[in-house]
Image: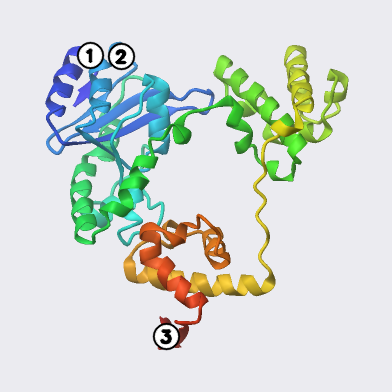
Amino acid sequence: MYLSDKESLDAFCERASKARVIAVDTEFLRERTYHPKLCLIQVATSEESAAIDPLLIDDLSSLVNLLVDEQITKVFHACTQDLEVILDAFGCLPTPVFDTQVAAAFLGQRQQIGYGALVESYCGVRLPKAESLTDWSRRPLDQDQLRYAEDDVIYLPRMYDRMIAELVRLDRWSWIEPEMAALTTASRTARDPEEAYKHLKRSGSLTRRQLAVAREVCAWRERTAAARDLPRKWIVSDEVLVETCKRTPRTVERLRTVRGTEQLSERDARALVAAVIRGVQCDPTQYPKVQHRDRPSQEMESVLDLMYAMLRIVSDKSGVAPQVIASRDDLYDLALGREGARLATGWRYELAGKTLSRLLTGEVGLTVKDGRLEVL
C-alpha cells in the first residue's frame, strides 16, 4: 500500500500495532543537506506492507507511537543510518531493534552482508537494484519505485523468524542481545558537537593541544552546518580543519594562508579563528585524551598472526564472522593479559578466548593437514 493521508496511515498503524514484529526501512536524501530529508518510510508486518509518504502526511504521530512501542520488535537491515534518520525526523529511537545484518554475522554469513544477498540466501529471491539511485523526494512515485521500496521490508519478518529460530537452536541469543541493545544507545546515534572532532579525518597526527583546538573548530563547524542545513564539508573540509589545528592561526589574515579557506566568508573566517583561540586557551588538564596503543614487537606480530589463524578456525567451525568475535587489538589485549580484554569474558571467552589462551600457554597448537589448518 502507498499511504499518503493520515486516515489510511492511522488505520494501518492500528492493524500493525497488534503484530509482535514489524519491518522498517527508510528512503532519504542528504547529499546537499546536513539533516537527512526523510522521503519515504516502509513498514511491513508478516501480512501486509506499506510505503508511508512523510512529504504528504503532516501528522505521523500514529507511526511514531508504533515505532516506540516496546512490545513490538522493529526489524531493520543495517539500521545505523535508518535510526539516525528517524531520530532526526521524530526525535525518538525505535526500541527494541533487531538488525538482520548483525544477526547474520553470528549465523555463518560474512560480516556486513548486503540486504540483497541475505534475501537470496534466506528466501531464495534475487532482488533487482534498478532504483538504488532514485530521487525519492520527487512526486509522484511510480509503481517500479514503490515495488523497490516494498522489497526492502517484505522479506524481513520471514528472515527474522528464521534467524531467531537459529539463534535459539545454537544457544546464541544471549550473545546477540547486548549487540542489538547497543544499536539504540544515544552515543551511537546522537550528534554531540563537542564530540565531532573524534570523527575528523587524519586527526591522528594532532597533538593533545591541537586536539583541543580541533574540538572547538569541529564543534563550530557542526553547529554551523546544522543551522544552515548544509553538509559539513560545504562549510569547511576536514583537510582544511586539520591544517588549521596544526597552524593555530590567531588572525583572519593568518588563517587565509591555509589553502582552502578562501571559500570562507569574512564572518565565518572570524568565527573559525575565535574557535581556534578558544582551543589554544584551553586548560591543559582539559585536553582530549589520546588513546595511544603501543605497537607490537616483531615477535608479538608473529604471535598475533598465529592467534588470528586460530581465530579463523574458530570462526569457520562456529559460523561467527571473525571480525565479530575479535579485532587484532582484542587479540593483542588478550596476549598481554590486559584488564578488560574482550576475549577474556562472556561469550567471546567461551567461543574463542579460552582456546586462544591455551594457544598462548602452549597447551594447544596448530598444524596443517590435507592443506588445511587444524588444532593440535
Which of these two is toward me, 239 or 349? 349
Amino acid on which disc 1 is placed: Asp
What x and y, as percent, mark residue 83? 38, 32
Give the number of the disc on residue 184. none
Q: Which residue is identified by label 3?
A: 376
Q: Residue shown at 67%/30% (left/top)?
A: 215
Q: Classify mark 1: residues with Cα within 10 Å, few (<14), some (14-19) or many (20+).
A: some
Q: Which residue is identified by label 1?
A: 5
The answer to whether the residues at label 2 and label 3 have Cβ atoms under 8 Å apart is no
Determine the image quadrant of residue 332.
bottom right
What x and y, as percent, mark residue 47? 12, 36
What's the distance in space between the residues labelled 1 and 3, CA to CA? 66 Å
The answer to whether the residues at label 2 and label 1 have Cβ atoms under 8 Å apart is yes
Q: Residue shown at 35%/59% (left/top)?
A: 347
Which of these two is toward me, 331 or 40? 331
Relative height, residue 5 to residue 367 (above, below): above
| Comes first in the chain, label 2 or label 3 | 2
Judge depth for marks 2 and 3 and give the one in front.
Answer: 3
Q: Classify mark 2: residues with Cα within 10 Å, few (<14), some (14-19) or many (20+).
A: some
Which of these two is toward me, 361 or 271? 361
Residue 242 shows in this picture: no
What x and y, as percent, mark residue 200? 64, 37
Q: Is residue 153 left or right of residue 241?
A: left
Q: Which residue is identified by label 2?
A: 56
Determine the image quadrant of residue 39.
top left
Residue 141 shows in this picture: yes
| Comes first in the chain, label 2 or label 1 | 1
Amino acid on which disc 2 is placed: Leu
